[in-house]
């Protein structure tokens, strides 16, 4: 085998993996929210969840990509662990489509590449068709890479050292380890199974040994999801563990069956003379039978995963993104929606801090003040992380609606972060009032209570408008009317305060604290109005619910 054969083999593998990558990315962009809607519709039933996993993986042509996507969805609270288990099992069946297509003597590379070229050349208004053109182009490149690998490995038939190695190596455990290692390195079961089919198709590996390599490849594909779950929450880690348990149990079962029964002979009888198809049939048999056995037992797999991965204790608001995961950047519409939920969470924290500080001003509570300060740190963290994520998303291929939404989210998170800062100013004023035993007149207290009520109401209405993306004209008018009412009230209260100072009914220290409170509350109302007016009026009401 010459150096050029080795280079051709590596080049073919590169084309195979590159084709799979651009095909998956094209599908995720074309499918977008449809992918999430599909999962939402079918994942309430284990069998339907399995069918969804089969469908998605059959199109993406990568169980690793589907499993990583599922891990990201679980981490972002898009899917529960129970829903994810069925999808993962279905993904293992869906990935067999690739091996089945590779076993057919048809030039799929030319067919899909030509179709992809035609779709990609359509005018810009055919956006979805152009994206599916990327999918089919990637599929074509995948098959071209597979054909290149097959051609590069054909000289191995005449290499005596390789032939001797294949005749002396027959240990099933070694075959499982080889398959697991190759797939773990490539991080693609489709690619490793394709290589195995190419070797078998050239007569370089007998079926009775190839099946053990195939069983190991099912374990090796779990490495990708295990790597993907690093830094995720407990449920996302459990989804990856379920994937591993599924394939390990299936491998143990089939190794025993292959040793006790003439499995290779049965498969050869089904498709005599076609080793590629024989491997594809073993691949299908492995995943279908394992799924049929373990799908009814999926609650036991979940329980085992929960025992292996313990819950992580959380105190108050966690210093992490709950709904967004960087893996979602592969599906821009879903990434935008999840960032929208993160900003909603930020609004809820800011609103909680405002009401908490107002309560502390009325009656000091040290424990509550510490919680507010912790939540303020969370707000600062979210502002930084969401901004970074929005910058990433903004550079993706977004539709018009998502482009406008991302633009508005940039402004909203800044306004909410400022609401948090101003609430801390109110908290500081409350602390000073307690420490220095500053007393306000009953009139001043009632004025502040009324102003606080209006400001809180304004923030509540603004957050509700943002959550529903409502463009209700009456609600917008109410927001503007309340803002004017707050401005008028603050002006009147400042005038009343100056009158109290002139009449020596208020000390200078009290006056400074009172004026600071008015200023901070008024500015919170201003930022609340900004949040309300950030709503994209071209978004249908309730789209994000």
Image: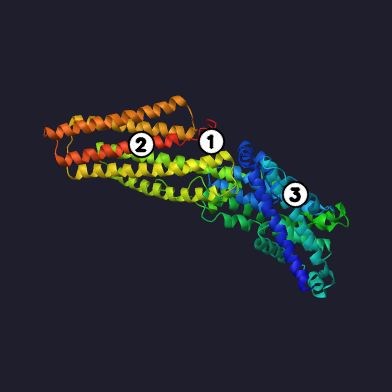
Say which mark, if any, is on residue 544.
1
Q: Residue furthest bottom?
A: 161
Q: Residue furthest left?
A: 504
Real-space CA distance between mark 3 and mark 1, rounded to the nearest whole angstrom = 35 Å
Q: Residues within 10 Å of mark 1 (few under 14, many from 20)?
A: few
Give x and y (percent) for residue 98: 75, 52
- Which residue position holds label 3? 117
**According to the image, what is the colour scheme of the structure?**
rainbow
Residue at disc 2, secondary structure = helix
**Quarter of the image that includes the N terminus:** bottom right
- Mark 1 or mark 2: which is in front? 2
Residue 500 in the figure: left or right of residue 42: left
Residue 69 in the figure: left or right of residue 137: left
Q: Residue furthest front?
A: 123
Residue 50 in the figure: left or right of residue 415: right
- In this rendering, the answer to whether 260 lies above or below 529 is below
Q: Is residue 422 visible?
A: yes
- Which residue position holds label 2? 526
């Amino acid at each position: 085998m010459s150096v050029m054969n080795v280079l051709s083999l590596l080049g073919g593998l590169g084309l195979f993996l590159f084709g799979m990558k651009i095909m998956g990315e094209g599908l995720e962009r074309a499918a977008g929210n449809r992918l999430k809607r599909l999962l939402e519709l079918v994942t309430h039933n284990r069998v339907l969840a399995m069918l969804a996993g089969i469908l998605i993986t059959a199109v993406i042509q990568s169980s690793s990509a589907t499993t990583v996507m599922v891990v990201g969805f679980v981490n972002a609270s898009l899917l529960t662990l129970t829903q994810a288990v069925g999808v993962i099992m279905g993904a293992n069946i869906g990935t067999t489509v690739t091996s089945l297509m590779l076993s057919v003597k048809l030039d799929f590379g030319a067919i899909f590449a030509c179709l992809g070229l035609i779709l990609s050349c359509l005018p810009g208004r055919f956006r979805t068709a152009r994206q599916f053109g990327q999918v089919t182009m990637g599929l074509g490149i995948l098959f071209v890479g597979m054909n290149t690998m097959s051609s590069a490995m054909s000289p191995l038939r005449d290499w005596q050292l390789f032939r001797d190695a294949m005749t002396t190596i027959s240990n099933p455990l070694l075959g499982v380890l080889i398959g697991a290692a190759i797939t773990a390195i490539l991080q693609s079961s489709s690619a490793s199974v394709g290589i195995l089919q190419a070797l078998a198709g050239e007569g370089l590996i007998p079926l009775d040994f190839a099946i053990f390599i195939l069983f190991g490849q099912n374990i090796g594909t779990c490495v990708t999801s295990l790597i993907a779950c690093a830094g995720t929450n407990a449920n996302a880690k459990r989804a990856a563990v379920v994937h591993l348990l599924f394939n390990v149990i299936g491998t143990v079962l089939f190794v025993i069956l292959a040793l006790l029964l003439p499995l290779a002979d049965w498969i050869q009888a089904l498709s005599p003379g076609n080793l590629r198809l024989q491997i594809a049939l073993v691949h299908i048999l492995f995943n279908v039978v394992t799924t049929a056995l373990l799908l009814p037992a999926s609650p036991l797999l979940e329980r085992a995963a929960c025992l292996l991965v313990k819950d992580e204790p959380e105190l108050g608001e966690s210093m992490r993104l709950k709904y967004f995961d960087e893996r979602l950047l592969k599906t821009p519409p879903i990434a935008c929606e999840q960032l929208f939920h993160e900003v909603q969470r930020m609004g809820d924290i800011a609103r909680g801090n405002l009401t908490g500080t107002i309560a502390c001003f009325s009656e000091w509570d040290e424990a509550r003040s510490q919680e507010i300060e912790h939540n303020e740190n969370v707000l600062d963290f979210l502002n930084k992380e969401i901004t970074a994520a929005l910058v990433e998303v903004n550079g993706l291929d977004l539709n018009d609606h998502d482009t406008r939404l991302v633009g508005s989210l940039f402004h909203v998170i800044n306004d909410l972060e400022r609401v948090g800062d101003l609430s801390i100013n109110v908290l500081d004023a409350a602390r000073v009032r307690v420490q220095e035993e500053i007393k306000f007149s009953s009139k001043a207290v009632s004025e502040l209570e009324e102003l606080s009520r209006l400001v809180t109401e304004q923030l509540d209405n603004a957050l509700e408008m943002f959550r529903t993306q409502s463009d209700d004209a009456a609600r917008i008018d109410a927001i503007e009317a309340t803002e004017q009412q707050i401005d008028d009230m603050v002006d009147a209260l400042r005038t009343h305060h100056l009158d109290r100072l002139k009449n020596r009914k208020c000390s200078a220290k009290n006056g400074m604290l009172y004026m600071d409170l008015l200023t901070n509350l008024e500015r919170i109302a201003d930022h609340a109005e900004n949040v309300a007016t950030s709503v994209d009026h071209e978004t249908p009401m309730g789209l994000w619910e």
